[in-house]
Image (cartoon, helix red, strand yellow):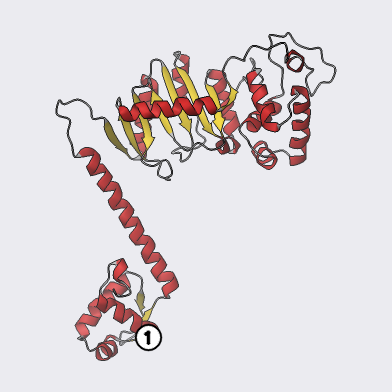
Amino acid sequence: MGHLLEPVGLGATDSDVYLYLLSHGQADPADIARSLALSTPTIRHSLQRLTAAALCNRLLGRPARYVAAPPEVALDALVLHQHQVLDELRARARELTVRRAPVADGSSPLLELVEGAEAVLRTLARLELGAREEVLIIDSPPYLNDGALNTNELQALTRGVRYRALYHAPVLALPDRLALLERYLSAGEQARSLPEVRMKMLIADRTEALIPLSFTGADASTRLLVRSSPLLDALLVTFDALWEKGAPLGGAHPAPSSATDTGSRDAPHPNQPGQSPRSPNSPQPLRPRDRDILRLLASGAKDRTIARALGITERTVVRRIHALMTTLNATTRFQAGVQAAHRGWLSPSPDSDR
């Protein structure tokens, strides 16, 4: 069986010295050396290592005396430090794995490691601003600049690039997130959400993708650039499958109404009883807040989450949801959000300035 401090890289002598200090409160090197039958220089070197590891400390005064740090604090901190060192080592190993095999014909590698926040942001800008046809996004944490407007997307949409974004639903409840979504939808983005989707990615023109090293990790500043390959094909199949399952959040053209839902589609505005019904081909008018409530409903958000996201009371949320469900003839909250999306209620209003 190994000694106490072996897992954190210290020796048997260090373990003996630390245990001696724990049992004696404080001691000088000479006392420790006599008790452990070791030389005083050996003990001094051991105390230096323990001090560097924050496992003991020297008291003021002479002769030099040392006291042990509480094990429940010191050892936890030391183990955490060792984990950080190992994580750094694993990251370097991944880098070496990706870079070790040069491409024989001099072309770009199928996988490229992108390290550092600036490098990741530059790569994202290159992919979006260089896209000619379509950009696919799965939007989920972690973020490099959470809450910032993606001007690359707005420029690409202006050029006619199609954007399809699938959102991790809890993200929509973050502060100002719905205002950003409204801005993207107004510019032409098509958006859907799923209650849980952690496969963060951006794919440009189905030829390049940027993904994190781990879909469950918290590191946003290290990504993999994936070029045309079976891996990229798998990412595309995954996105398309998830997109089909997502709840629409607006941006797409509303589905044509059928004879069975014309009544609910043309029902009076829930905030203005008795209002004349609009044309059967026109989307239902909504207050901006009702539109936000319906988007969060479609994402599966709860009343408390919606209230917190919009800065209103939970009672107000419940009242507005009831009115909207009645107008939509919806039997469930989620159904209300989905029906509103299919009828074009969640599309940005023509005069929206967001």
Q: Secondary structure at mark 1?
A: strand
Q: Residue pushed farthest front? A: 260
Q: Position of residue 38 (x, y in %)?
A: 21, 86
- The residue at the point 47 percent across, 21 percent down is 163
- The residue at the point 26 percent across, 89 percent down is 30
Give the residue type at disc 1. Gln
Report the front residue among 314 and 231. Answer: 231
Q: Which residue position holds label 1?
A: 26
- Relative vertical location of residue 157 with respect to residue 41 in this rendering, above or below: above
Position of 318 compared to 37: left or right?
right
Q: Is residue 108 visible?
A: yes
Q: Position of residue 277 (x, y in %)?
A: 78, 12
Quarter where residue 76 is shown: bottom left
Quarter where residue 86 is shown: bottom left
- Relative vertical location of residue 4 with respect to residue 79 in this rendering, above or below: below
- Relative vertical location of residue 150 with respect to residue 265 in this rendering, above or below: below
Quarter where residue 29 is shown: bottom left
Report the front residue among 339 and 49. Answer: 339
Q: Position of residue 113 (x, y in %)?
A: 29, 37
Position of 178 compared to 266: left or right?
left
Classify the position of the N terminus by image quarter. Answer: bottom left
